[in-house]
Image (cartoon, rainbow, N blue to C red):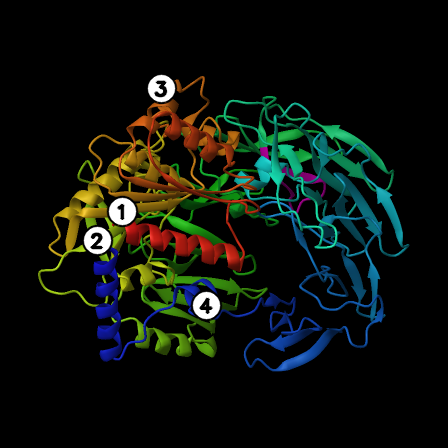
């Protein structure tokens, strides 16, 4: 078998070289040789004519003209700045007046989105760098509106640095690890609400509102940290250390969250209250443009009722501004709520599709800005001077992403006519934008464009990458339509081997994620290991089943209370489609996925009469009772409310039914999908007498990052499919 496979690969590579194509190298793919070039971060300056960007070595922060790219001035030069000596800058934040900046030279990740650092304050007038504070592990620093103070978190407490006086105020003092957090999101808020800092300044800089998390009753999760030489070869530690954090599992105890406000003038704290249930989530708090008015976004634990309150932090009086309810769950699109002096925007699926609505400053519906049987996929921003609203939408197709603007009269204009997917980053007055456009088989092209469509300059067109792909890719991905288990047309793409011989059948691998509102099948460029698989003689196919995004609420919510059931059936239906294709060997089908995709892989392999010969599950959910409260209960409710749904779609409970060959992979330092899920799955398989392969990464989290780890993982996956298909 191995000799036949090697002979075939040799013939394939010989054919590629003779055809003038360069064979792909998996390590080159993994280390970014085919990664598109993007434009370094361009920070829009207040004048709307220029932007700020770091130099390649991080030693300078410079201001450039948008339209010409000409250097206007050097804002910071570490080579001649006074005060603290820094090696480089990796990030910066301007004060509202742009006369001061926060800068940092390193950062240490905490969880998926959070990181800690030591901030420095640069005064442009004095050309001087000073440390923000002597406190360690600083995070989420935020200038006050007048630029004279900075709020920041450290050690689970909040502090304010008064720049004019050089003094530091302790806003809170009761913060303790795994007990009480002030102003910083707890683990589940960060993971599922995509937020790290939960405090904000009032418009006059007199109040700082913040959330307090009492997580003392949340269950602990402890995992070992391996690596004898992590402290250095001269000081080996032959016992693992351990990390403990609070992880609320489905149906379990969440943090008790309370709302507070600090008055800078009186240096006093006060608790604020709202007429909501005790276990309400507060995914965002944000001051509006109105003095003393705090917007508090509230979501019940079942996540089917969203309320927006306006709370006067001085008087404590609250008013209900908006309510959005649903029979299943309310869309978690909180950052689309943007406040101006006259109105605020809101994204909702109440029409059956995700659309943009405009409300008055007191909460009255002013206008439905977008309508139709298509989804707004992102709210980009609003031009408050000209009352224009910019958004990205899946208007022509669930697979495309186009850019649009709409005004108060309802006039809608498309920005750009390119196919594929387009995204924009605007300047400060929304007159210019950096446009990034790509398609399924076309690398990104990045350019500067105005609202009339004039292209001022091309920032990168990835011409070298395009040529490289021409040399090494004889085949391209093509879009297909595949019937779901119930006949619903599903969107997909297929990638064939570079040489498809007439009458020859090839093994096929299904690549899928399948999670709620996610999409793998989008008309945008992505170059990953599927191209290498195709070159090894595999047909690679990806199909978005029911429950995925871009096709309206009904399609997305059909998996409610039964995560995994329809998704696995649809991937099995894709296998049935493949069996009907003349170029596919229906007896040599594989499936793989990561995280939710790993969950679907396990469900597929444990389904009756399943068609797959082999599957790979990386960091999979094995039973949703293990997973966190916010995500799981949004789609499944609690185990007490939906025991049948949890039981019916638990790979752990179906372990004895697994057929085909399984490769089970997990990082043992995974804080998201905890590794004990895969370890318990392994135990269940062993007890059931089911043979399987496994690969565990001792120091890796959910993403299994790092060059050595990625190479090891992906070579292991390729070898597994070559061996078993």
Secondary structure predominantly adopted by residues drawn in magenta:
strand
Q: CA distance from mark 2 to mark 3?
A: 36 Å
Residue 723 in the magenta stretch? The answer is no
Q: CA distance from mark 2 to mark 1?
A: 8 Å
Q: Which class describes the residues within 10 Å of circle 4: few (<14), some (14-19), or many (20+)?
A: many
Q: Which class describes the residues within 10 Å of circle 2: few (<14), some (14-19), or many (20+)?
A: many
The residue mark sitting in front, 3 or 1, is 1
The residue nearer to you, when weighing 620 against 69, is: 620
Decide if residue 555 is on the left or right side of residue 321.
left
Q: Which comes sooner in the sequence, label 2 or label 1?
A: 2
Q: Which comes sooner in the sequence, label 1 or label 4?
A: 4
Q: Which residue is mark 3?
A: 644
State the SS at label 4. Answer: strand
The residues colored magenta run 282-296
Tag count: 4
Q: Which residue is mark 1?
A: 590
Residue closest to the far left:
503
Q: Is residue 323 visible?
A: no
Q: State the mark number for residue 507.
A: 2
The residue nearer to you, when weighing 464 against 165, is: 464
State the SS at label 2. Answer: strand
Q: Which comes sooner in the sequence, label 3 or label 1?
A: 1
Q: State the mark number for residue 435.
A: 4
Q: State the mark number for residue 445.
A: none
Q: Position of residue 441 (x, y in %)?
A: 31, 66
Q: Position of residue 90 (x, y in %)?
A: 67, 64
Q: Is residue 653 visible?
A: yes
State the SS at label 1. Answer: strand
């Amino acid at each position: 078998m191995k000799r036949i496979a090697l002979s075939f690969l040799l013939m394939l590579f010989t054919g590629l070289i003779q055809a003038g194509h360069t064979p792909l190298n998996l390590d080159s793919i993994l280390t970014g040789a085919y990664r598109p070039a993007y434009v370094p971060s361009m920070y829009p300056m207040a004048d709307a004519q220029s932007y700020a960007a770091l130099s390649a070595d991080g030693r300078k922060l410079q201001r450039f003209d948008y339209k010409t790219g000409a250097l206007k001035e050097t804002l910071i030069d570490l080579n001649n700045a006074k005060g603290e000596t820094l090696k480089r800058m990796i990030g910066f934040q301007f004060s509202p007046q742009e006369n001061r900046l926060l800068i940092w030279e390193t950062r240490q990740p905490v969880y998926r989105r959070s990181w800690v650092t030591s901030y420095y304050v640069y005064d442009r007038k004095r050309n001087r760098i000073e440390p923000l504070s002597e406190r360690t592990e600083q995070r989420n620093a935020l200038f006050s509106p007048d630029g004279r103070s900075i709020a920041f978190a450290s050690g689970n407490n909040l502090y304010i640095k008064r720049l004019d006086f050089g003094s530091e105020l302790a806003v809170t003092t009761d913060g303790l690890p795994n007990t009480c957090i002030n102003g910083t999101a707890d683990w589940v808020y960060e993971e599922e609400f995509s937020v790290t800092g939960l405090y904000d300044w009032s418009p006059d800089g007199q109040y700082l509102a913040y959330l307090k998390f009492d997580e003392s009753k949340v269950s602990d999760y402890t995992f070992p940290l391996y690596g004898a030489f992590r402290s250095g070869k001269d000081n080996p530690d032959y016992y693992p250390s351990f990390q403990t954090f609070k992880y609320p599992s489905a149906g379990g105890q969440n943090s008790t969250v309370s709302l507070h406000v600090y008055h800078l003038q009186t240096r006093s704290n006060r608790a604020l209250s709202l007429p909501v249930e005790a276990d309400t989530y507060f995914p965002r708090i944000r001051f509006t443009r109105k003095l003393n008015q705090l917007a508090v976004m509230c979501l019940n634990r079942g996540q089917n009722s969203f309320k927006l309150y306006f709370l006067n932090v001085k008087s404590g009086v609250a008013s209900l501004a908006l309510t959005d309810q649903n029979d299943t769950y309310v869309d978690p699109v909180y950052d689309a709520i943007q406040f101006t002096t006259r109105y605020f925007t809101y994204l909702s699926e109440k029409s059956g599709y995700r659309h943009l609505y405009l409300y008055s400053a007191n909460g009255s519906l002013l206008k439905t800005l977008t309508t139709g049987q298509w989804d707004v996929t992102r709210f980009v921003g609003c031009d408050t001077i000209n009352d224009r609203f910019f958004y990205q939408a899946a208007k022509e197709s669930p697979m495309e992403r186009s850019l649009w603007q709409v005004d108060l009269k309802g006039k809608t204009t498309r920005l750009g006519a390119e196919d594929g997917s387009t995204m924009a980053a605007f300047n400060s007055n929304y007159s210019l934008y950096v446009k990034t456009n790509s398609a399924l088989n076309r690398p990104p092209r990045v350019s500067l464009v105005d609202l009339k469509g004039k292209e001022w300059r091309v920032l990168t067109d990835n011409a070298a990458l395009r040529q490289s792909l021409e040399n090494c890719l004889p085949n391209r991905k093509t879009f297909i339509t595949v019937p779901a288990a119930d006949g619903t047309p599903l969107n997909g793409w297929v990638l064939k081997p570079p040489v498809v011989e007439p009458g020859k059948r090839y093994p096929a691998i299904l690549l899928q994620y399948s999670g709620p509102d996610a999409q793998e099948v989008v008309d945008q460029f992505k170059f990953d290991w599927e191209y290498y698989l195709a070159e090894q003689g595999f047909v690679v196919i990806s199909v978005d089943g029911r429950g995925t995004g871009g096709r309206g609420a009904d399609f997305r919510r059909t998996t409610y209370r039964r995560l995994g059931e329809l998704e696995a059936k649809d991937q099995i239906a894709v296998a049935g489609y493949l069996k009907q294709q003349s170029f596919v060997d229906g007896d040599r089908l594989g499936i793989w996925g990561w995280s939710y995709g790993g969950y679907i892989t396990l469900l597929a392999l444990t389904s009756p009469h399943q068609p797959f010969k082999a599957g790979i599950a990386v960091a999979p959910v094995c039973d949703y009772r293990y997973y966190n409260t916010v995500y799981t209960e949004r789609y499944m409710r609690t185990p007490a409310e939906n025991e049948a749904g949890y039981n019916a779609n638990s790979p752990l409970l179906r372990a004895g039914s697994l057929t085909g060959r399984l490769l089970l992979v997990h990082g043992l330092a995974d804080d998201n999908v905890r590794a004990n899920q895969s370890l318990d799955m392994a135990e269940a398989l062993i007890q059931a007498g089911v043979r399987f392969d496994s690969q565990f990464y001792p120091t890796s989290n959910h993403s299994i990052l790092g060059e050595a780890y990625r190479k090891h993982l992906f070579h292991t996956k390729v070898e597994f499919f070559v061996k078993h298909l």
